[in-house]
Image (spheres, helix red, strand yellow):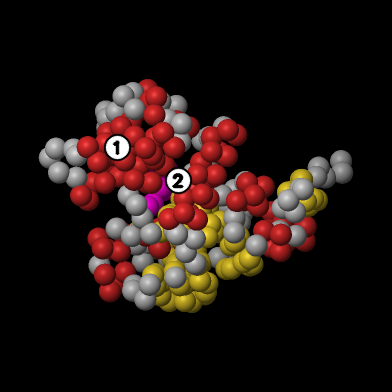
Amino acid sequence: MLEFSHVAVALGKQLLSRDLCMQLSPGRLHVIIGPNGTGKTSLLRALFGELPLQEGTIRFNGHTLADLGANRWRQQFGYMPQNNQLELELSVLEVVVLGRLQSLKLRLSDDDLRAAMTALQSLGMAHLADRPMSTLSGGQRQMVLFAQVLLREPQIMLLDEPVSALDLQHQMQLMEHLHHQTRQRNWISLVVLHDLNLAAQFADELIVLADGRLQAMGPPSEVLTEALISQLYQVPVQIHHDAAGLPYIRTLRRAS
């Protein structure tokens, strides 16, 4: 169990979030949504230990970052930040293998190479294994870095806008793989998404942040209401439901 107890996060003198209380369970995909500037990325950074907590505590299985120290705390996470700049001249396979950096030796083991290739194959990227990262498109790089995160075998997955550079096919591929692996490996997955319809399709629970506070939390069918979305984003919307009962949002033009 991952527990947030009255958490407040600040960047310098600016308070980004406050009094956040929630519990996240293994085997579930949690998606954070909310307008720009509401502390979504900062919350992930604080959870990973990159930003100090202004107040409150974050506990995973009863332990805090202070209990374990930064290195042991971060070993529990697979973290993919929003801005992934990798300038090294490495091949795709080499970049994926770096997901096991903590345990790598001078000579790569067959197990490390097999695991890296399996991760690439699961994402339809195995044919790029020998390509230099510098020759890939932004979307391809994003998928390779996701494969690297998978190789870390984490207990908690933190992904900040992982589909931002991907086309529709690869958005669905990444989210479906994440959803499946979250169930199979009993991860706690926490993902920031701007695409509300994608969030509605894949989230077990939505976490709605605005003005630095938790506005709502629960299944998409309960959380996504016309009143809430219109208030959060200051646009008129209609909410419909597909054959599976999942909500999808249609934005409306304002009358001219």
Residues drawn in magenta: 78-86
Above-or-below relation of 149 to 45: above
The quarter of the image holding the N terminus is: bottom left
Amino acid type indicated by mark 2: Gln
Residue 167 lies in what quarter of the image?
top right
Above-or-below relation of 89 to 203: above
Looking at the image, how many numbered discs can be counted on the residues?
A: 2
| Residue at left offset 87%, top offset 44% | 255
Amino acid type indicated by mark 1: Arg
Q: Does residue 132 appear anywhere in the picture?
A: no
**Residue 24 percent coordinates (x, y):** 50, 67
Query: Quick one: 171 or 136, which is closer to the camera?
Result: 171
* Residue that carries the numbered disc 1 in the rendered image: 114
Q: Which mark is residue 82?
A: 2
**Residue 59 percent coordinates (x, y):** 39, 72
Query: Quick one: 195 or 40, which is closer to the camera?
Result: 195
Q: Does residue 154 appear anywhere in the picture?
A: yes
Instruction: Provide the secondary structure element on which disc 2 rests.
Output: loop
The quarter of the image holding the C terminus is: top right
**Residue 114 percent coordinates (x, y):** 29, 37
**Residue 130 percent coordinates (x, y):** 31, 24
Query: Quick one: 211 or 244, which is closer to the camera?
Result: 244
